[in-house]
Amino acid sequence: MDLLRFITAGSVDDGKSTLIGRLLYDTKNILADQMEAIERASKSRNVGEIDLALLTDGLRSEREQGITIDVAYKYFQTPKRKFISIDAPGHIQYTRNMVTGASNADLAIILVDARHGVVEQTRRHSLIASMLGIPHVIVAINKMDLVGNSEDAFLEIAKSYQELASKLLIKDLTIIPVSALNGDNIVDRSVNMPWYTGETLLSVLENVNVLKDQNLEDSRFSVQYVIRPQTEELHDYRGYAGRVQSGTFKKGDLIKVLPSEQESKIAKIEFGGNEIEEASVLESVTILLEDDIDISRGDMIVSLNNSPIVSQDIEALVCWMDDKKQLKPGNKYVLQHGTARSRCSIRDIEYQIDINSYEKLDEVESLKLNDVARIVLRTAQPIAYDAYQRNRSNGAAILIDETSNVTVGACMIE
Amino acid sequence: MSISVKEVSEISDQDAGRRTPDYLDQLEAEAIYIMREVAGQFERPALLFSGGKDSITLVRLAQKAFAPGKIPFPLVHVDTGHNFIEAINYRDELAQLTGAKLIVRYVEDTIKAKGLKEQTGKNASRNWLQTFTLLDTIEEFEFDACIGGARRDEEKARAKERIFSFRDEFGQWDPKRQRPELWNLFNGRIHKGENVRVFPISNWTELDVWAYLKREKIALPSIYFAHERELILRDGHLLANTPVIEKDENDQIVTRQVRFRTVGDMTCTAAVESSAATLDEVIAEITVSRISERGETRIDDQQTEAAMEDRKKGGYF
Ligand SMILES: Nc1nc2c(ncn2[C@@H]2O[C@H](COP(=O)(O)OP(=O)(O)O)[C@@H](O)[C@H]2O)c(=O)[nH]1
Ligand SMILES: [Mg+2]
């Protein structure tokens, strides 16, 4: 059984929290005492029926305001798969929290209120999903019960969404009419919408192929830590601990270390101290090399004949996340890419992307919270990267403010 | 079930050649990655060890992360003086077998040194006081990162917390100002005096932990399995009958066959009636049980709807 991480996005009140609650409820993943707690809370707030949204709204201010502020994780499983659901806030002022949630997702569910159709938030969240390279997108047209379960209403919204999607990079799109409140087409097929013959939401979640999304071609391994026991029997042991970011590594493979360009051969791969034959994408292993070369945290091991770009000049899409300070050309930050950190300075803001209209805005002088733009930066040390849309794990980087130490930008290298 | 922990220190050969990617492998790889980020990014990390199954899982993950080397940080235990003796014995044995350094600090000492007032009465607990000892210990050793076994599925406030969770110099968590946490690029940069709490098994559920303990053949303290015990029956909860719990005439002393589903302080950890004597039987029971772990056994969280959130803001783990 494998694991699928998905994020739910949409405007405030589109029904994200209700949808997650419904998924948990209909797959029998809500425990008795949790159910009682929700019933109690629903009663005390006079909402009549039980409110499944209360399952995810965890912080006091969220319950008080009745909205989702921060990313909440929920865990459930069906006989087919384990799921990590990421409920992200929909409001524009929390876009950075959505980006946080989306960065690790295999799939995005974008909710649309059937009464309102495609709105600004739909466009914004779709752009974020596409920019962050989420391979699968489900558009759940929710509250179908409030538009008389009408097929025409569904088709019209679906058509306008497809128009929007044609401007973006969405590899796999499914559009489903649902009612989160009543449970139509979530886990069980809707009896109110017999005209819909496609899959239910859960069925898509259970069946999307995530293995195919992995980059198995470009072998990349960022060194996290050097294991040197320095005991008598392991006197010369030198193992490079890290996680295979993409591709595979095998004993005997010819490799290159970046940025130093030194070459060697894999002598051994270990997991938990035991030798294994090969290591594939996302596995945390230890690599031992035949030659005694100087490698430390931040270096990258790659296959000899398939190299990433090694450069100090980087162009990237950035989502700006600092609410205190703006990004301006000339500013300096720490760039963290894989396990490497390097100081960098912003050379230029090429253009900003209006996240609602997707228009490019030229001559932008600075970026404020939640702005998305294409920037040019120069790092103090060379960085070994791939384009994000080809290799999500080796094309991602963050910007850290040198004085506050806060993560202020999410970069997708182009 | 014995409390021998020998098996914990010997990583089985089964791992060699195991290739099918399943969710436990994925969770394990992620947790090992996080452990190594801690070792790579911080000067003075520590692993907070409670004797519970989650921190036992952390120790195994740390062993795997750094094998064949030793775990490159100490195990730190804040001893409330209200712990189960079985958990304490297990802790000592485990530290010895893994060769990890063990640091123990006592809540009792903090109470004396600071002249703190203990809660009194029948529901008195040291749960809140242990925060002081923890913060003092962090200061004493200048720990810049503390690894803990909290899971997001345990509780609502935890469901919102980052994997690298920033704490200010007073140890406080501010849920509204959490750092964005993108991809697997963890930002552990801090100023002196601040620290980061790190939760490598954030994405594990209770069942995942049990399944992992079973797969890795890890022995647990005996109180996790069914045994006969004298207990205090209070408001429907079964508490260990120990001098550290004040009793009154409403409490009934009973003998039952029970096991503990979590292992915290005796004062706030309730037992469940059970005949499950092996890991398989425990897992079977939990799978069908329709009550969550904290709901069933943690008396401290039931007080207010935001109990955990408030404690975390104050520096609690
Ligand atoms: N009629 C109807 N109401 C819904 C549906 N889904 C959600 N709602 C209601 O819409 C409101 C907002 O839902 P919530 O899940 O909190 O939205 P969120 O802000 O996206 O998390 C609540 O009052 C829900 O009961 C639906 O399918 N039909
Ligand atoms: Mg919500």
Image: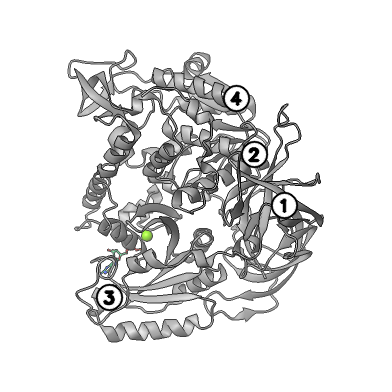
Amino acid type, label 4: Gly
Answer with mark 1 or mark 3, whichever residue precedes in sequence. Answer: 3
Amino acid type, label 1: Arg
Q: Is mark 4 on a helix, strand or loop?
A: loop
Q: Disc 3, disc 2: CB below 8 Å?
A: no
Q: Mark 3 points at which residue?
A: A144
Q: Which of marks 4 and 3 is in front?
A: 4
Q: Is mark 3 on a helix, strand or loop?
A: helix
The answer for how far apart the CA atoms under marks 4 and 2 are is 17 Å
Q: Is mark 2 on a helix, strand or loop?
A: helix
Q: Which of A352 and A290 is in front in this view?
A: A290
Q: Mark 4 points at which residue?
A: B99
The answer for how far apart the CA atoms under marks 3 and 2 are is 51 Å
Q: Are marks 1 and 2 on the same chain?
A: no
Amino acid type, label 3: Met
Q: Which of marks 1 and 4 is in front?
A: 4
Quarter of the image where ligand 1 sits: bottom left
Q: Disc 4, disc 2: CB below 8 Å?
A: no
Q: Would you call the spot at circle 2 few (<14 residues within 10 Å), some (14-19), or many (20 or more)?
A: many
- The chain under label 2 reads B
- The chain under label 1 reads A
Q: Report x, y in % for residue A157.
A: 37, 82
